[in-house]
Image (cartoon, grey):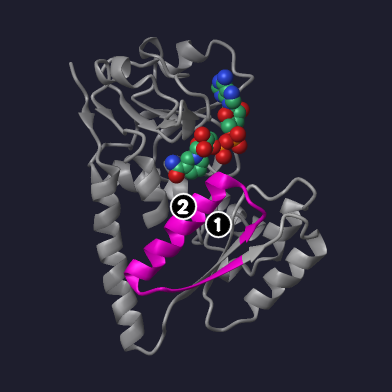
Amino acid sequence: MTARIINGTRIGKEIREEVCADVLRLKNSGVIPGLAAVLVGNHPASHIYIRNKIKACDSLGVFSKLVHLPEDTTTTQLLQCVSDLNHQDSLHGILVQLPLPNHIDEAAILFAIDPAKDVDGLHPLNAGNLALGHAGLRPCTPSGVIEILLRERISVKGAHVVVIGRSNLVGKPLGLLLLQQHATVTLCHSRTKNLGKITQTGDILVAAVGYPGLVTADLVKPGAVVIDVGINRVDDKLVGDVDYEPVLKKASLLTPVPGGVGPMTIAC
Ligand code: NAD
């Protein structure tokens, strides 16, 4: 068996076209949607992520404002910046690029973002609404994974989905979104015993770890759908968490890196 490769770039483009139509409708009603992206310091990967998000805004006709602050910005200064952005009517979304430098109180910053502008869905109010199954803003990478599953017509209801990774950004919210789609969810993490025994029972397996080659073919149930969220740089090449070629031969569907979940994150 060779898995079909899921084209995240194509699905991402489909979503952007839908968003483009929404943006046009908003503009016709007199609203130009605006996003503020805040970058602190010079984390190389963050530069690339922010640049791609700004580019995506430009291509959609969304107004964007990049706020680039120096590495030595204090928590108090960043709180002031977030407060200013909260009060700017031309900005409807605020995105503070993570990770922040270690000396900054990340929780305090996320808590300071107006929940209605919290496009990353990381404010405790939005995270709480997600846990309770209420409406709210959702983190973009987990939303991207759900969109892939829905748009590829992969049946999630009643399926056993194993997610490796339990971060606040990806694994945990993804587990909750999958529960809302009526999946049976198992979250695995660095302390999970007998990881392979669990992953081998997953109809759908999601890897969100940041460890290249962690998901070897023997961890995959034959015919499973495998979603690779991981982004790792190995010998100057971007790779995921999945041992790509061997898993391609065992799974039924697989997302590549790059070109899988990444473009979905930006689109969402
Ligand atoms: P994180 O470091 O916050 O979390 C990693 C998780 O993996 C933790 O829950 C940890 O318990 C678990 N883990 C670590 N080692 C493990 C092991 N040996 N076995 C099982 N579980 C293990 O990372 P994150 O922010 O959740 O990101 C995960 C990966 O996804 C990273 O590679 C990141 O770059 C990537 N990412 C990609 C996108 C995208 O758009 N494609 C978006 C966000 C994150």
- Tag 1–tag 2 contact (CB < 8 Å): yes
Count of marks placed on residues: 2
Question: Tag 2 or tag 1, which sits nearer the N-term?
Answer: 1
Which x, y percent locates residue 146? 37, 45
SS at mark 2? helix
Q: Where in the figure is residue 139, as x and y percent of width and height?
A: 51, 52
Distance from disc 1 to disc 2, alpha carbons, whole Å, reads 8 Å
Q: How many residues crowd around disc 1 within 10 Å: few (fewer than 14), some, or many (20 or more)? A: many
Q: Which residue is drawn at the image coordinates 33% and 22% (left, top)? A: 244
> At x 18% / y 16%, what residue is drawn?
1
Q: Give the secondary structure at mark 1.
A: loop
For this rendering, which residue is in front, 94 or 127?
94
- The residue under label 1 is 121
Left or right for 187, reference 128 = left
**Amino acid type, callout 1:** Gly
Image vertical order of residue 238 relative to residue 92, above or below: above
Residue, x 59% and y 55% (percent of image)?
97
**Depth check, front residue: 166 or 44:** 44
Q: Is 24 on the left-hand or right-hand side of 128?
A: left
Kindly tell me whether mark 2's CB lies below 8 Å from ligand 1. yes
Q: Is residue 111 magenta?
A: no
Q: Is residue 230 above or below residue 81?
A: above
Point out which mark residue 171 bears: none
Q: Residue at x 28, y 47 (%)?
A: 9
**Residue 237 seen from this side:** yes
Q: Determine which residue is flagged by label 2.
A: 140
Which amino acid, mark 2? Cys
Per the rendered image, the range of residues in magenta is 39-67
Image quarter of residue 80? bottom right
Q: Quadrant of residue 227?
A: top left
For disc 2, the neighbor class at 10 Å (few under 14, some 14 to 19, many from 20) is many
